């Protein structure tokens, strides 16, 4: 009986984690946020932002974006499971938001980057995750 309950609980957890056809699951290292009130778990130091540079805007991910020049508190700058940057070109395909840092929901962004005023080159100590775009 105990084995049956455990098996059913495992199946239920697996079924609830399966993405819907219109919402592809993001890479494991780049967790999405939900922009809807009550479901948005981004820290107050960040904002749940759609990645408008995504090749398929209908399925563009939402990430918690730090303020310009800031990165996550209390973690190694290169820990891409907590924070990352994106290759985010402008509409003319030139550099745009490459200096912006994104974090998983709930992470505080109050650590000043090494070079916070460098524009698209700011926060270069944070790993750029091309696969998250």
Image (cartoon, rainbow, N blue to C red):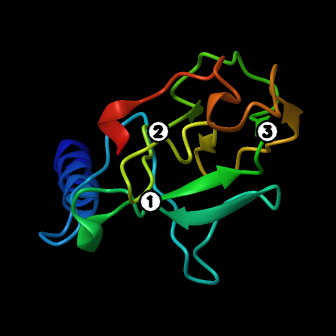
Residue 24: x %, y % from top left: 21, 58
Locate the C terminus and report the quarter of the image it occupies: top left
Looking at the image, residue 100 lies above or below residue 118: below
Residue 35 location, x and y as percent?
55, 75
Q: Which residue: 63% across, 43% down?
A: 100
Q: Is residue 2 left or right of residue 74?
A: left
Q: Nearer the viewer, residue 130 or 107?
A: 130
Which element is circle 3 on?
loop
Q: Is residue 66 above or below residue 118?
A: below
> In the structure shown, which secondary structural element does the residue marked by tag 2 occupy?
loop
Residue 89: which disc? none
Separation (CA) of disc 2 from disc 3 = 14 Å
76 vs 6, nearest the viewer: 76
Distance CA(mark 1)–CA(mark 3): 18 Å
Q: Earlier in the sequence, mark 2 or mark 3?
A: 3
Classed neighbour count for the residue bearing mark 1: other residues with Cα under 10 Å, few (<14), some (14–19), many (≥20):
some
Q: Position of residue 94 (x, y in %)?
A: 43, 44
The answer to whether marks 2 and 1 mark residues whose Cβ atoms lie closer than 8 Å is yes
| Residue at 61% over, 55% down | 64
The residue identified by callout 1 is 51
Give the image quarter of residue 124.
Answer: top right
- Which residue in the protein does label 2 denote? 86
């Amino acid at each position: 009986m105990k084995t049956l309950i455990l098996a059913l609980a495992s199946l239920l957890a697996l079924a609830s984690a399966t993405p819907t056809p219109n919402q592809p699951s993001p890479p494991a290292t780049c967790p999405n946020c939900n922009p809807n009130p009550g479901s948005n778990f981004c820290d107050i130091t960040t904002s749940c932002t759609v990645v408008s540079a995504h090749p398929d805007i209908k399925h563009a991910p939402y990430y918690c974006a730090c303020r310009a020049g800031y990165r996550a508190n209390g973690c190694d700058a290169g820990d891409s499971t907590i924070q990352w940057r994106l290759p985010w070109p402008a509409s003319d395909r030139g550099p745009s938001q490459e200096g912006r840092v994104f974090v998983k929901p709930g992470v505080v962004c109050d650590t000043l980057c090494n070079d916070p005023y460098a524009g698209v080159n700011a926060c270069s100590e944070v790993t750029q995750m091309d696969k998250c775009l």
